[in-house]
């Protein structure tokens, strides 16, 4: 599928669990609240259980949970539960960075090491959580071992909280008589059900907006047909919608109608879900897609040079010192992934001066070094040369609204001993981020970043000079006219009225920003031209 054909920046219906694309229906918000309860309150160290059909969003919710961890939480995440009790103990210790050298193969030695870690964490006021995804695959002996771990306690408090995520079979597994002791310790249960028709429509539109789309291509009947074929399961909605867009591109269609959705569903769903009378439509769509691809290949043979998209993402630095300039392309050397100790060591040696980080960011924007002035604690002020440069800075409790802006930003990191340094956020995927700190470029688990980030951010965006003072509700004039022109469904005008405020709230909700209807710097940054300037890397290949 050609993203440019639909006016998109990235695929809107990828099945990877990217928190930027999360649309929280009421039931998803309830499910997330249960998981957060399990971490923050804990129910005295019991189990929290979240179940749901395949594709309903359990894993995506777990990734979103990692974005919203309380500062005092430490999480061991187990993604491959097909392990015996001994292997599971080793995995938990490895996730918590516990040294288990010489202890492997001994359940007592591993539990002793884990207990010592939990007691030390308790003394520091930390809460340790074990999160197991696909927990229906845990053998009974491993589940019993998990239950025994919750016996680790002080005189007043359990030391370990356990969150179990799994398919409905997990409920049946826990109902077995031999697991009744574990089942009795479950303090919160939630079953995640599929989306209803209205939620399906909101889900599809939300993902389209996050991907940069403005004109939603699916007709109302096509959306209803999508819901019927997918049964409201988000993963199936993504798969069918993606294939329908491909069919629409192959047919040069501006709108995706119900027939294209039927054809896409017939192609991608398992045979028992297919409708036999639609198979010829699916075959026709595939043939048309292949023909269109061959025609485009003949007209546009591969080029040996970089694509325009690559050049836009990684512009060469302008007027930045050689010591702090960024390379014009991904470096050939592998990008290391740091653990917490390595990051602390790097921060201990880092320069607290924010200027080098700002120079690197200016280089990404191809801006001169004198485009801004920088305060000692990080904030910047545009100099007016050029006059379309704007600064954005502040504090945020969560990282995901900043990632949804899809722009490089500066983040203030805090080391173990309290020292701070500004790092340049270069990219992010569902699990990791890519940062530049001085001359070092590295990947970092998003959980580690959340633990070391003090909430401060700063960055740049480019837009008309008239936006130097953001318009407020009740204002009028050219700045308000610019706002109205950037938001769909509003008539032309220059009045910051109730309709404009509601349109801004809708945008803010979709991007995870505070939905106050006020066009602050982050909202203006979200409305700026997405093709003007650098964007975050979304594929963090370790090369």
Image (cartoon, rainbow, N blue to C red):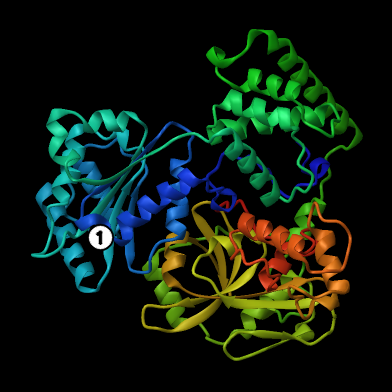
> As drawn, which residue projects farthest toward the bottom?
376
Q: Position of residue 513 (x, y in %)?
A: 60, 63
Report the residue that reaches farthest toward the top: 277
Instruction: Confirm whether residue 376 shows in the render.
Output: yes
In this picture, is 77 found above or below 348? above
At horizontal 84% and vertical 84% (from top left) the residue drawn is 385
Which quarter of the picture shows residue 532?
bottom right
Q: Quadrant of the N terminus?
A: top right
Element type at marker 1?
loop
Task: Name the residue rendered at 68%, 57% in the picture.
Answer: 507
- Horizontal placement of 187 versus 40: left or right? left
Query: Around disc 1, counting alpha carbons within 10 Å, would you say few (fewer than 14), some (14 to 19), or many (20 or more)?
Result: some
Q: Residue at x 30, y 32 (%)?
A: 170
Question: What residue would you read off at disc 1?
Answer: 98
**Location of residue 517 (image quadrant):** bottom right
369 or 30: which is nearer to us?
Answer: 30
């Amino acid at each position: 599928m050609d993203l440019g054909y639909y006016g998109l920046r990235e695929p809107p219906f990828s099945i990877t669990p990217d928190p930027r694309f999360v649309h929280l229906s009421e039931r998803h918000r309830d499910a997330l609240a249960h998981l957060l309860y399990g971490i923050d309150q804990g129910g005295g160290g019991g189990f929290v259980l979240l179940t749901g059909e395949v594709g309903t969003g359990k894993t995506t919710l777990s990734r979103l949970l990692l974005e919203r961890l309380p500062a005092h939480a430490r999480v061991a995440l187990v993604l491959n539960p097909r392990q015996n009790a001994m292997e599971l103990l080793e995995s938990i210790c490895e996730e918590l960075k516990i040294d288990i050298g010489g202890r492997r193969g001994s359940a007592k030695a591993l539990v002793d090491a884990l207990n010592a870690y939990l007691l030390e964490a308790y003394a520091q006021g930390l809460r340790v959580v074990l999160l197991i995804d696909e927990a229906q695959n845990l053998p009974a002996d491993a589940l019993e071992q998990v239950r025994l771990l919750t016996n680790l306690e002080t005189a007043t408090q359990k030391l370990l909280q356990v969150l179990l995520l799994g398919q409905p079979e997990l409920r049946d597994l826990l109902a077995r008589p031999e697991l009744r002791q574990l089942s009795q310790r479950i303090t919160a249960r939630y079953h995640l059900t599929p989306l209803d028709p209205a939620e399906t429509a909101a889900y599809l539109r939300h993902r389209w907006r996050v991907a940069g789309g403005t004109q939603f291509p699916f007709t109302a009947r096509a959306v209803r047909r999508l819901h019927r074929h997918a049964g409201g399961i988000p993963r199936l909605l993504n798969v069918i919608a993606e294939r329908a867009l491909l069919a629409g591109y192959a047919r040069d269609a501006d709108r995706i109608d119900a027939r294209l959705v039927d054809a896409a569903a017939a192609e991608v769903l398992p045979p028992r879900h297919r409708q036999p009378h639609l198979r010829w439509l699916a075959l026709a769509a595939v043939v048309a897609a292949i023909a269109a691809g061959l025609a485009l290949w003949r007209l546009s043979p591969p080029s040996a040079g970089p694509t325009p998209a690559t050049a836009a993402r990684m512009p060469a630095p302008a007027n930045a010192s050689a010591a702090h300039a960024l390379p014009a392309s991904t470096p050939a050397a592998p990008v290391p992934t740091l653990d917490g100790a390595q990051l602390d060591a790097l921060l201990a040696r880092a320069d607290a001066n924010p200027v080098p980080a700002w120079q690197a960011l200016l280089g990404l924007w191809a801006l001169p070094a004198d485009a801004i002035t920088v305060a000692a604690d990080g904030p910047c002020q545009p100099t007016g040369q050029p006059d379309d440069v704007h600064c954005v800075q502040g504090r945020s409790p969560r990282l995901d609204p900043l990632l949804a802006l899809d722009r490089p930003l500066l983040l203030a990191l805090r080391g173990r001993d309290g020292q701070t340094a500004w790092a340049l956020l270069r990219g992010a995927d569902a699990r990791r981020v890519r940062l530049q700190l001085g001359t070092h470029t590295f990947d970092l688990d998003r959980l580690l970043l959340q633990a070391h980030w003090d909430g401060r951010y700063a960055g740049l965006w480019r837009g008309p000079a008239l936006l130097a003072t953001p318009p407020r509700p009740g204002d009028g004039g050219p700045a308000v006219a610019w706002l109205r022109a950037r938001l769909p469904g509003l008539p032309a005008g220059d009045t910051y009225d109730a309709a404009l405020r509601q349109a801004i709230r809708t945008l803010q909700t979709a991007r995870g920003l505070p939905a106050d209807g006020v066009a602050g710097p982050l909202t203006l940054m979200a409305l700026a031209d997405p093709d003007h300037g650098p964007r975050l890397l979304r594929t963090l290949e370790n090369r």
